[in-house]
Amino acid sequence: MKLFKLLLLPLFVLISTNVFSQKIGDGVVLAHFNAEWNSANEVVWLGDIEECNVVKIDIMKNPKFQTKHKIVVVPTLILFKDGEEVKRWQANIEFKIIEEKKYIQEEVDEQNLSDF
């Protein structure tokens, strides 16, 4: 059974791939796909994103997720709502996410408000 890290402000928990599928199927979830070799370009402010769960996946340890979610560059951030991908941000040629935190937070907020 493969395990990976789940970040829930700012606690890391090891969970199985089945639990990951359940987590992204429940509400608004921001998934951070990266690889250990690219840890210098980790998106460090993810723990500051409010009103969503944040999940971190190392694609080298969990290659099934790389294929399933079509990750072609790391880091990649995918915003899910009730299990469906609603937005994706991918790294530039330097393997860095250039989108600012405030724009990602705005997208999270918009997804949360869309239920009302």
Image: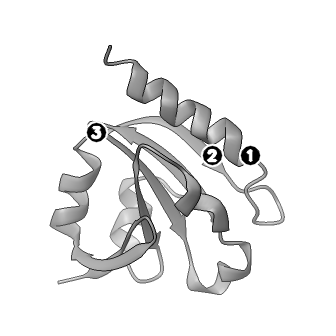
Q: Earlier in the sequence, mark 1 or mark 2?
A: 2
> Is 11 situated above or below 116?
below
Q: Looking at the rendered structure, which numbered label has been put on residue 99?
A: 1
Residue drawn at (53%, 62%) of the image: 47
Q: Amino acid at mark 3?
A: Gly
Residue under pointer 2: 89
Looking at the rendering, which quadrant does residue 14 occupy?
bottom left
Contact check, label 1 and label 2, Cβ < 8 Å: yes
104 or 2: which is nearer to us? Answer: 104
Q: Position of residue 61 (x, y in %)?
A: 41, 83
Q: Is residue 5 left or right of residue 49?
A: left
> Is 110 situated above or below 104?
above
Residue at the top extreme, as displayed: 116
Q: How many tags in the picture?
A: 3
Q: Earlier in the sequence, mark 3 or mark 1?
A: 3
Looking at the rendering, which quadrant does residue 45 occupy?
bottom right
Between disc 1 and disc 2, the foreground one is: 1
Residue under pointer 3: 27
Q: Position of residue 32 (x, y in %)?
A: 51, 61
Q: Secondary structure at mark 3?
A: loop
Q: Secondary structure at mark 2?
A: strand
Q: Amino acid at mark 1?
A: Glu
Q: CA distance from mark 3 to mark 1?
A: 22 Å
Between disc 2 and disc 3, the foreground one is: 3
